[in-house]
Amino acid sequence: MIPKTNSRSRVSKKPWESKSYRDWVKANNYCLICYGAAHEAHHVRECLPRTMGVRVSDKWVVPLCLTHHNDLHQHSRTFWASHGIDPLAWCQASHSAWVLKALRRET
Ligand SMILES: [Zn+2]
Ligand SMILES: [Zn+2]
């Protein structure tokens, strides 16, 4: 039997806001640019509205290899456009797939 306080905190803990998504992105994906091994789960704060930039949700992470992660930090304004990639669309798709998986695990 689960005490009431525990079940409450369990409900408020959203699986999609946990570090495990970030780890999953890193472990199960390839660099979005070159398909090399992902080295870093990068928060794409450069693509989000400024108001959301204070505390970026772990939803907005993309896998990048070491080289492209460095590149991105040096040319954050032009990086995505120059590669013709919309990282936010990738985040949406990847994250909803992961949430579905997480929910399936829960039940
Ligand atoms: Zn790369
Ligand atoms: Zn980064």
Image (tube, grey):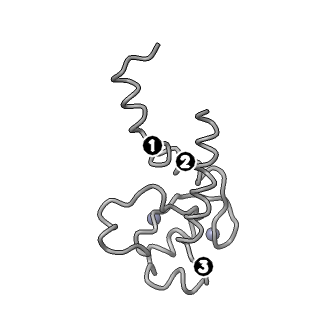
Q: Residue 48 at what x, y percent from top left? A: 40, 73
Q: CA distance from mark 2 to mark 3?
A: 22 Å
Query: For numbered disc 1, what is the local secondary structure?
Result: loop
Direction from residue 49 to residue 97 in the image, left or right: right
**Number of residues whose C-alpha sits closer than 10 Å to that of mark 2, classed few (under 14), some (14–19) or many (20 or more):** few
How far across and down, in percent of the image, does residue 81 sit?
A: 54, 85
Disc number at residue 23? 2
Q: Counting residues from the N terminus, which is met first, the one under dot 2 or under dot 3?
A: 2
Q: Is residue 49 left or right of residue 43?
A: left
Labels 1 and 3 touching (C-beta < 8 A): no
Q: Residue 94, how many percent across, how many down?
A: 61, 59
- Residue 85 shows which numbered tag? 3
Residues at marks 1 and 3, CA–CA distance in whole angstroms: 29 Å
Direction top: furthest residue: 1
Which residue corresponds to mark 1? Answer: 14
Label 2 vs 1, first from the N-terminus: 1
Label 1 amino acid? Answer: Lys
Local packing at callout 3 (Cα closer than 10 Å; few below 14, some 14-19, many 20+) is few
Name the quarter showing ligand 2.
bottom left
Q: Amino acid at mark 3?
A: Ile
The residue shown at (47%, 45%) is: 19
Q: Decide if residue 17 is on the left or right side of residue 33.
A: left
